[in-house]
Amino acid sequence: MYGALDISTSGMTAQRTRIEAIAQNIANKDAILDSNGELSPYRERIVHFAPGDPSAKTADGREMGVHVSMIEINQAPFNWRYDPESAFAAKSGPHTGYVPEPMVNPVVQQMNAMEAARAYEMNVVAAEATKAMTAQALRLLA
Amino acid sequence: MLIDEVTSSGAMPALEMMVRFAGSRQRVLAHNIANIDTPNFRPMDVSPGGFQAALAEAVERRRAATGGESGQLEWKETSEVRAGADGFLELTPKTASGNILFHDRNNRDLERTMQDLVENVTVFRAAIDLMRGRTELLRQAISERS
C-alpha cells in the first residue's frame, strides 16, 4: 500500500520536472544571448520518461513507478528572423541579415504543459484513492 | 487455537484475500497511471475476473473440507496471483489493455485505467466494511453487550 503511494509520487515528481522544463522553454523563447552576453540562442529542453524509479529505497519501488531518463537539448535549426539592422544579424553566409532565434513554439509548449498538468492530476487522484484505502483499513481497528 | 477460529470463521478469509488483492493491485494501477506519458510503455493489469475465479475455487475447496463455517483458505497459485511468504500477494500483471497504440508506442487507455482505480477502491472498501461488521460483532461479544 505504501508502495502505491511511492509510485504515484514518482509520477508527480516526473510530471513536475516536465512542467519546469516547459516553463523554462516559454520563459526563454526570445532569449538569443547566453548568460555571458554572447550570441547563443536558447535551445528547447525536452524531458523524457522511462518506467521504474532508480531513486526508490526498496527493490519493489525501483521496479515500479516512473523517472526522468534524460533531458534532451533540442538541436533543431534556429528560427532565423530577418533583421539586418540588428547587431546580432549574420554578416555573411546564407543567413546574411538574419538573426537566429530559439526554435520554441509557444503553442506546442502550452499543449505539453496542459498534458503534464492533467497527468499530474491523475497521479494525485491515484494517491488520494490509495490514501482512502489506507484510512479504511485503519478504521477497521479503531 | 481459539484466536485462529475467530479470524478464520465465516467469510473472513475470503474478505482478507479480497483486501490483499485490492491492496496489491493498487500498486499495479498506480504504476500504469505514473507511466501514462512514457513512450514504449505498455500498461499491464491483473485480471480481477481471474482472481475471483481462483477465490471461488478456494472457497469451494474449504466448503468441501470443513463445511464452510471455519478454516483457512488454501490459495492455489495462478499465473498472475501468488501468495508470498510475508503475507503479501505477489502479482504478475499479464493482462494487456488491448487498446490501440499511440504515436509514442504506448497503448494507454485513460478512461479504463481510472475506472479500474475506482473499482479497486470500491472492492477494497466493501471488503473492509464487511470485515468491520465482523470485528464489531466480536467487540460486542467481548464487552458482553447486546
Image: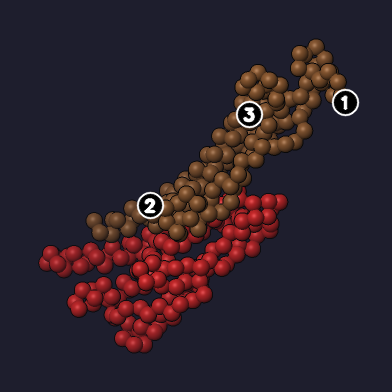
- Disc nearest the viewer among 3 and 1: 1
Colouring mode (rainbow / by chain / secondary structure / one colour): by chain
N-term-proximal mark, 2 vs 3: 3
Name the residue carrying label 1. Answer: A94
Q: Report the chain holding disc 2.
A: A
Mark 3 touching mark 1, by CB under 8 A?
A: no
Dot 2: what SS?
helix
Identify the residue at horizontal 39%, vertical 57% (top origin).
Answer: A1
For the residues labelled 2 and 3, the Cα–Cα distance comes to 37 Å
Residue at image mark 3: A26
Residue under pointer 2: A132
Residue A27, quarter of picture: top right
Q: Residue at x 36, y 83 (%)?
A: B62
Up/down of B29 relative to B93, above or below: above
Residue B3 position, x and y percent, is 21, 74
Chain A display color: brown
- CA distance separating discs 3 and 1: 28 Å
